[in-house]
Image (cartoon, rainbow, N blue to C red):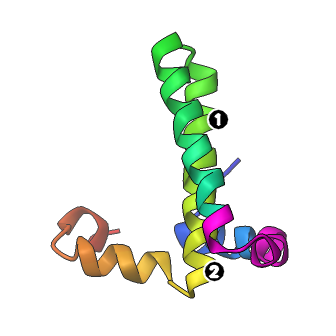
Amino acid sequence: MGSMDLSCIQEFIRSEYFERDSKRGLYATFTWLVEEVGELAEALLNGDRSSIEDEIADVIAWTISIANLLGIDVVKAFEKKYRGSAICRSQ
């Protein structure tokens, strides 16, 4: 599988989950994110790399879901916060 850029990932999350996330609401969606962070912590404690990878993906997905609910473009937010990154600008 080729690499996915962050804009593509955000659009995928929006197309697949926005309606459901909207019905659930911002704070309930945030609760799901917190649960996934807890699952990541558990995976880290257990040292299970496969579970760690899965939970990192879940944390990213739920974070993007929150951004979508708030109308935040995650790429623009990241560029604003970390605009000094020469590595990202060169690619």
| Mark 2 or mark 1: whose residue is earlier in sequence | 1
Secondary structure state at the residue bearing disc 2: helix
Image label count: 2
Q: How crowded is mark 1: few (under 14 residues within 10 Å), some or many (20 or more)?
A: some
In this orientation, which residue lies closer to the viewer: 27 or 85? 27
Residue 28: horizontal and vertical position, in percent? 68, 63
The magenta region covers 15-28
Residue 67: horizontal and vertical position, in percent? 55, 75
Q: Is the magenta stretch mostly helix, strand or loop?
A: helix
Residue ID for mark 2:
69
Residue 30: horizontal and vertical position, in percent? 59, 61
Q: Residue at x 48, y 28 (%)?
A: 41
Please say whether residue 27 is one of the residues in the magenta stretch. yes
Asked whether, in this view, residue 13 is left or right of residue 51, the answer is: right
Q: Quadrant of residue 22?
A: bottom right
Q: Residue at x 23, y 70 (%)?
A: 82
In this orientation, which residue lies closer to the viewer: 71 or 26? 26
Residue ID for mark 1:
54
Q: Which amino acid does label 2 sit on?
A: Leu
Please say whether residue 41 is one of the residues in the magenta stretch. no
Asked whether, in this view, residue 64 is left or right of residue 20, the answer is: left
Q: Which amino acid does label 1 sit on?
A: Asp
Secondary structure state at the residue bearing disc 1: helix
Q: Quadrant of residue 26?
A: bottom right
Q: Give the residue at the far top of this rendering.
A: 46
Image quadrant where one finds the C terminus: bottom left
Which label sits in the foreground, 2 or 1? 2
Residue 81 in sight: yes
Vertical side of 31 occupied by 6: above or below: below
